Structure formats: C-alpha cells, structure tokens
Image (tube, rainbow, N blue to C red):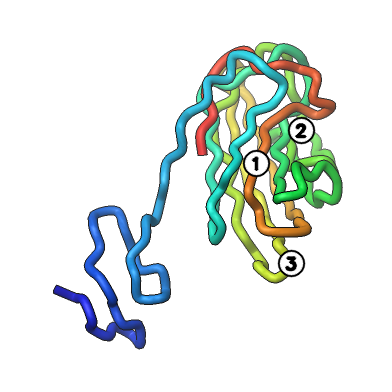
C-alpha cells in the first residue's frame, strides 16, 4: 500500500478509492462530485446551495433548458450573505453576433422565447484571498442555429456557498430541461 510513503514531498496518510485524488495534504478526497439534476419546468430561478468549503471549480450543465420569455439567462454567485447581483465583470455574445456587458451575473447575450439551451458554464476560483471567481460558458441552441459564449469575473465578500441560475430581471419562468452541477 502507499500509506505513509512520501511522494514528491507529500506523505500519503491513507489509501484512496476509485475516483479520488490527493488533496495536497496527503489525504485522498473526491475529485469530482455530481449534484442532483434539477428539472427546470417551473420557477424563476434554480439555486444550488450548501456548496462545500474549499470548492475550486464548478461546472453547471444545461440539458434542454428553456424559459417562458425572451429574458437573458444569467448565472449569479453567492456566499453566506446571499446571492450577489452586482459587481460582475464580463460579456457574452452570440457567435457571429454582437456582444453585451453584464454586471448583474454571467450572461448569454440573446434569448428568444422557446430557445432550447444545451452546454456548460465553468466557474473557477482565481484568488481565494479575495474570493474571486471567473466564468466561461459555451451554450448552443438545439432548436435553432446559434451558439452563445460568455466570460467574466466576480469577487465575493466571503467564501462561495451557492449558485443561482435565473433570467435577467428574474421574471421569466423555466419551462423545460434540466440543470446540474
């Protein structure tokens, strides 16, 4: 067994199991954890709460997601103080289209009622001292010929513990699909 052996200056303290990797302190931890898919057939927002302390990367997956109107879908981050809806830096665009800046979340520029979104957003911790996260996203429409791209950054006031998927203005409701992290 590899326990109590030093590898590249890290002493392994216990054997791991399938799907685990070293956490930097000599112990094994889960590398990727799949959340529970949320069916997006009602409501104005989808929240993923109780994110574990120490998370450094989150992938948000869209499968057949649609909203009732033409508001732009946005991703918002939050900490123990709640969801933050200001201070986002970045932009989104449709491939071959125009770009727009977003300050209220990480957004996709352009939405048409009955659009069906498929793709992923990747959130990455950039600076743990300032709780700064970056976002990159690529989402395609399965019912039309279009692709949306987004990128940006957001610094929180504390450790990230929740993520919200909603629409700009928060009034359109979800009416199809699934979202998971």
Q: Badge 2 is on which residue?
A: 109
- Identify the image quadrant of residue 124: bottom right
Structural distance between the alpha carbons of marks 3 and 1: 18 Å
Q: From the top left corner, tell me how far across and down residue 2 is, in percent.
A: 19, 75
Looking at the picture, tell me which residue is in the foreground, 3 or 34.
3
Structural distance between the alpha carbons of marks 2 and 3: 28 Å
Q: From the top left corner, tell me how far across and down residue 95 is, in percent.
A: 68, 35
Q: From the top left corner, tell me how far across and down residue 47 is, in percent.
A: 63, 33
Label 3: which secondary element:
loop
Q: Does residue 139 show up?
A: yes
Q: Badge 3 is on which residue?
A: 130
How crowded pointer 1 is (Cα within 10 Å; few <14, some 14-19, many 20+) is rated as many
Closer to the camera: disc 2 or disc 3?
3
Q: From the top left corner, tell me how far across and down residue 40 is, in percent.
A: 58, 20
Dot label at residue 70: none
Q: Badge 1 is on which residue?
A: 163
Label 1: which secondary element:
strand
Structural distance between the alpha carbons of marks 2 and 1: 20 Å
Asked whether, in this view, residue 16 is left or right of residue 128, the answer is left
In this rendering, the answer to whether 142 lies above or below 149 is above
- Identify the image quadrant of residue 16: bottom left
- First in sequence, mark 3 or 1: give its number: 3
- First in sequence, mark 2 or 3: give its number: 2
Label 2: which secondary element:
loop
- Identify the image quadrant of residue 163: top right
- First in sequence, mark 2 or 1: give its number: 2
How crowded pointer 3 is (Cα within 10 Å; few <14, some 14-19, many 20+) is rated as some
Q: Does residue 56 show up?
A: no
In this rendering, the answer to whether 116 lies above or below 85 is above
């Amino acid at each position: 067994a590899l326990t109590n052996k030093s590898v590249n200056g890290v002493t392994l303290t216990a054997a791991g199991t399938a799907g685990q990797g070293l956490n930097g302190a000599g112990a094994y931890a889960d590398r990727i954890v799949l959340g529970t898919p949320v069916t997006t057939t009602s409501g104005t927002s989808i929240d993923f709460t109780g994110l574990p302390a120490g998370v450094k990367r989150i992938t948000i997956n869209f499968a057949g997601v649609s909203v009732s109107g033409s508001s732009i879908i946005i991703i918002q981050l939050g900490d123990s103080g709640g969801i933050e809806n200001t201070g986002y830096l970045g932009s989104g665009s449709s491939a071959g289209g125009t770009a727009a800046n977003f300050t209220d979340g990480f957004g996709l520029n352009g939405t048409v009622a009955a659009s069906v979104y498929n793709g992923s957003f990747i959130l990455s911790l950039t600076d743990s001292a300032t709780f700064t996260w970056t976002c990159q996203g690529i989402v395609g429409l399965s019912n039309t010929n279009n692709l949306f791209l987004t990128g940006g950054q957001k610094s929180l006031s504390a450790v990230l513990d929740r993520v919200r998927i909603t629409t700009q203005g928060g009034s359109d409701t979800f009416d199809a699909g699934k979202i998971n992290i």
